Amino acid sequence: MQLAPKAVVVAVLRSAILWAILLIAAVGLVLGIPAMRIPIVFAVLGLAVVVALIELTWLTPAAVRSFRYSVSSDGIHTSEGVVFQRENFLPMQQILIVERRQGPIMRSVGLVKVRLRVPGTYVDIDGVTDDAFIDLQREVRSAHAPDAHG
């Protein structure tokens, strides 16, 4: 399954906020630099703006769209990545907690971050609907339920 389409908007908004803070801080530093070094600083700032635009328009949306997860009776498989790819498999019996996390941006668009905790680590599925969270939680509970035959 893919993440909800609104997850792209959330990820881009988060990155944009981070880049805005970094660029504002960089401009603040420029104001304290001697005049003869300003062209070099503006070149670096220009490069930072180009990198920010590439991240916001291509890399972040592609990364969110590349994220996949699937649930089976054995466990949960996730795969992600555009440049560097990563796959995880969480055996259903090792999942200890299915956590629902939601900040103000996620809440405003009706999405949830699911954190799956296993011994020693966790895996996040960032940008699913409430219904998908409930389904995921139900699958984990049913895997941990005592077997009806014994």
Image (tube, rainbow, N blue to C red):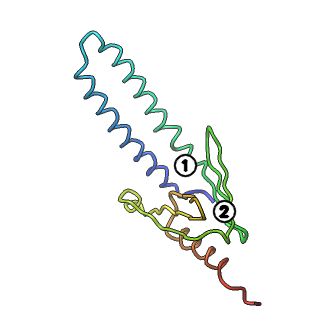
Confirm or deny contact between disc 2 and disc 1 (CB under 8 A): no
What is the crowding at mark 2: few (fewer than 14 residues within 10 Å), some, or many (at least 20)? some
**Residue sitting farthest toward the front:** 120
Q: At which x and y percent is residue 72?
A: 71, 68
Q: At which x and y percent is residue 12?
A: 44, 45
**Residue sitting farthest toward the top:** 36
Q: Residue at x 60, y 57 (%)?
A: 2
**Closer to the camera in the image, 109 or 52:** 52
Q: At which x and y percent is residue 3?
A: 56, 57
Q: Which mark is residue 64?
A: 1
**Residue sitting farthest toward the right:** 149
* Residue highlighted by disc 2: 90
Q: Which mark is residue 39?
A: none
Side of 15 relative to 97 (left or right): left
**Closer to the camera in the image, 119 or 21:** 119
Secondary structure of the residue carrying tag 2 is strand
Q: Amino acid at mark 2?
A: Leu
What is the crowding at mark 1: few (fewer than 14 residues within 10 Å), some, or many (at least 20)? many
Q: Residue at x 63, y 55 (%)?
A: 68
Q: Amino acid at mark 1?
A: Val
Which one is in front in this view, the residue at disc 2 or the one at disc 1? 2
Secondary structure of the residue carrying tag 1 is helix
